Every structure is written in structure tokens, then in C-alpha cells.
Amino acid sequence: MKLHTCAHLLSLSALLAVGCHSPVDDDGSTVPDSCEATPPVVAPQKTDILFVIDNSGSMTEEQQGIATELPAFVAALKQGSGVIQDFRVGVITTSVYQRQRVADGTDIIRAFPDQEGRLQPVKDEAKQPTGERFIESSDPELLPKFQRLVDQGTSGSGQEAPFEAVRLAVASPLATQPPEEGGNGGFLRDDARLLVVVVSDEEDCSSTQRPPPVYLGQDRAVDSCTEQGDKLTPVSEYYQAFQGLKDSRGASREVLWATIGPVALTDKRAEVTTTTEGGTTYVRNVDCPTSYGPGYRQSDMAKAFDATRANLDSICKPSYQQTLLDIAELATVAQSVSVVNLPDPRLAVVYVTRSDGSVQTCTAANGDFRYEPPTDGRSARIFFLGPCLRRVGDTKVEVKVLCAG
């Protein structure tokens, strides 16, 4: 059945014949008295993707591992689970500050003014920085640019602060400051979701305070960020800041979070242990041999966004391909879509084609979706509910209108 074909339950004449009142005649009715020539349209799904790359001294292999698996990630994003995807990608680092306490008890505080939540420049083929700060999904050079962008080197802070970096990037004045002034303005779009992907082998050590209240000591066997964790900004405070993001029109911004971090390979748990190598003792996750932290805060943030922890995986995996594919699914399977040219949600029938070819029929009357009308220039949205929740592998979403005529 073609999309422009109207679905009829009863014609207008049949309604009148049985004595029914036609909704067409109601005051202020939006019910069309004839089939519309232009069908409702499901708008492309807009997602702004922010990778947060740990650029400390231990991350060479992990950055290379992410870059290697990006072709599958990009392909999965473009496939889109039945809805056209309009995405862009930017990268920041985990470097915000570093406070190191040396042997005589004094503190050395290092700042990272060219990072601190700032979108890092896209590199050209010679790996030289350009004026670009993010990459559009329509860019024919998306993949090679993206691969070069995740290579952030290993000269960054050893006191990783991904939560604070994200806060600065999207929830501080930096988010709207023009790029020519060193800001991230223009990256976050209205009507777009934000997907944050943290890639790190260490514990989060984030604080909104300056100078940072937690210091790193000389003993690698001491997990400074956990032992001084009561001085850090609570994970819940950062979570609430991210959940409270609005776009320029005041609409709530849907935020997704994924972490490839220092959690256990077998069951994603956060737990501390120590190992001694070459005479030096290191703090690690109990089941993640290349990590440098237990992953408590990293795990807590992922669980705040998804209690099932489907958005969390171990940095110690030998390959990140499946992890990135799972994140791509998270990015593409939205439980809401923008629609235009929908006269009345009571007349909408949404058809979701599943991966096995079956078609789920959804109506507002049955409680299968919720409708949010357009306001202030923003598109209307349909939010999927109950049996009509979208699934990984869905191949199509169509909206049709029941009309009298």
C-alpha cells in the first residue's frame, strides 16, 4: 500500500447513514473532510554524537581499537532501523585539569586550556588540524575524518574527568560560545538528541571546583579518586545537569549515554584490585587487566541512564566492534519521531515494520503512542509506548491518516 493512500474505517456517508455525528463538523476540528494529497512525513532523526576520548598516557591501543572498528559503527548508524538518520560527530577529551602532589607535599596544578570540553579540530589527511569542529553524516569523508579525530594522542591529563568535560561542552557557556572564540556553538541542534560516548581506561575524577579538590599522589597502588571521592561532584548531580538540557527553543533535549570503561569483562561490575608489574603496583578493575581504576563512577553514570547497563562495556575487550554496534543501535532506535503534516493525532495510524517483516499497527486510542503537538516552530512528535516500542532491527516507520471522504 502506497504511503499517500488514505485508510478508511467508515466513509462520511456511512457515518451519517447510521446517525453518527461526524467529527468534521466539530468546532475547531482538524479532521479533514477529504483525503489529503500530501501524506504525513516522518522526519529524519537528528542525533548529535559526542565522543569523549581519554588521552592519557595509557590509551594508545584503545584509541587505535576504536578507530579500527568505526566503519561498522558508521554503517550501522546510517542503516538507521527504518528511519533516516541525520547525525553529526564531535570529539572532546577527558583532560580538564591535573592536580599532582609531589614528595615535598606541594601541589602542581596543570590546566588544559585548549581542551576542557572544547570540540577538538578535525584533522586533514596530513593529520594537521583544520577549522572543522564536527563532521556531518552527509560528509563523503566522514569515516576517515572520524578515524583521525578519535586519535587524540596520549599527552593529556592522568586525572581523567569525562563528566566535567561533558558538562563544560554542553551545559556551560562554552556550549553556545561561537567557534571563532573557541567555543562549541553550532554543534548542538534544536530537535536533536545528544549521544555521549565515553572511552576511558580509568575512573572518573570530575569536580566543578577549581582548583580540583582531589589530588593524585605518587603511589600508583592508591586509587586517589576513589579514596577522596567524597570531595568530587556527585554522579547524580552531573546526571541531573545532563537530563535538564534544553535546546534554544526551550524544548527538553533527549540525552543518551554510553561508556566503554574500566569495568569487568565478564559481568561489567565495578570492583577494585591491585596488581604488581615490574616492581610497580597498580590499581585496576578486578576483571579488566589493562584498566587503571575500578570504574565505580563510570558504572554509576551508565546505570543512571540505563538500569540494564546495555550502554556499558569493558575497555579491556580485545575488539570494540560489537560494543560500537550496540551503541549505534542505541543511537538509532529512538522511542520518538518528529512528524509533519499530521492534522489530528486521533486519526493517525502508525505502522512499524519489524525485522521479521511483520507490521505492528499503532493508534493513540489504544495507547500505543503519545503525541506532542508542535510549538514555537518545533515539530510535532510521536512517542512510542507499550507494544509499539521500537526495537533494534525495525526496518520502516510509516504514518497514515484515517479520513472522512
Image (spheres, rainbow, N blue to C red):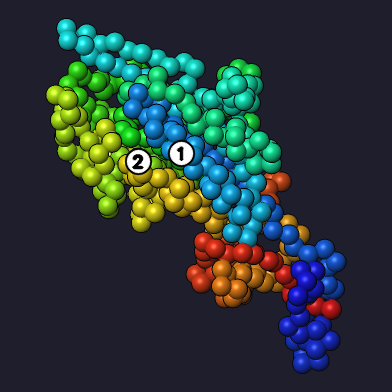
Find residue 201 and report its image quarter. Answer: top left
Of callouts 1 and 2, the N-terminal one? 1
What residue is rendered at 59% in x and 26% in y? 122
What residue is rendered at 54% in x and 27% in y? 119
Tell which residue pokes out farthest to the bottom in this image: 18
Read off the residue under disc 2: 315
Can you say whether 270 is above or below 52 in the image? below
Find residue 36 and report its image quarter. Answer: bottom right
From where the camera sits, is residue 115 visible?
A: yes
**On-image quarter of the C terminus:** bottom right
Instruction: Residue 327 in the image: state x and y as whole percent.
Output: 47, 49
Find residue 246 and report its image quarter. Answer: top right
**On-image quarter of the N terminus:** bottom right
Instruction: Residue 208 in the image: state x and y as whole percent.
Output: 37, 26
Label 1 sits on what residue type?
Ile
The residue nearer to you, when weighing 96 against 151, is 151
Near mark 2 (Cα within 10 A), the count class, few <14, some 14-19 or many ≥20, is: many
Viewed as shown, does residue 179 lie left or right of 303? right
Near mark 1 (Cα within 10 A), the count class, few <14, some 14-19 or many ≥20, is: many
From where the camera sits, is residue 242 visible?
A: no
Alpha carbons under labels 1 and 2: distance apart: 10 Å
What residue is rendered at 25% in x and 20% in y? 215
Q: Secondary structure at mark 1?
A: helix
Q: Secondary structure at mark 2?
A: loop
Can you say whether 116 is above or below 295 in the image? above
| Label disc, if present, on residue 300 of the rendered structure | none
Instruction: Residue 149 in the image: state x and y as whole percent.
Output: 54, 30
Label 2 sits on what residue type?
Ile
| Label disc, if present, on residue 66 of the rendered structure | 1
The residue nearer to you, when weighing 151 against 119, is 151
Viewed as shown, does residue 204 lie left or right of 78? left
Can you say whether 304 is above or below 202 in the image? below
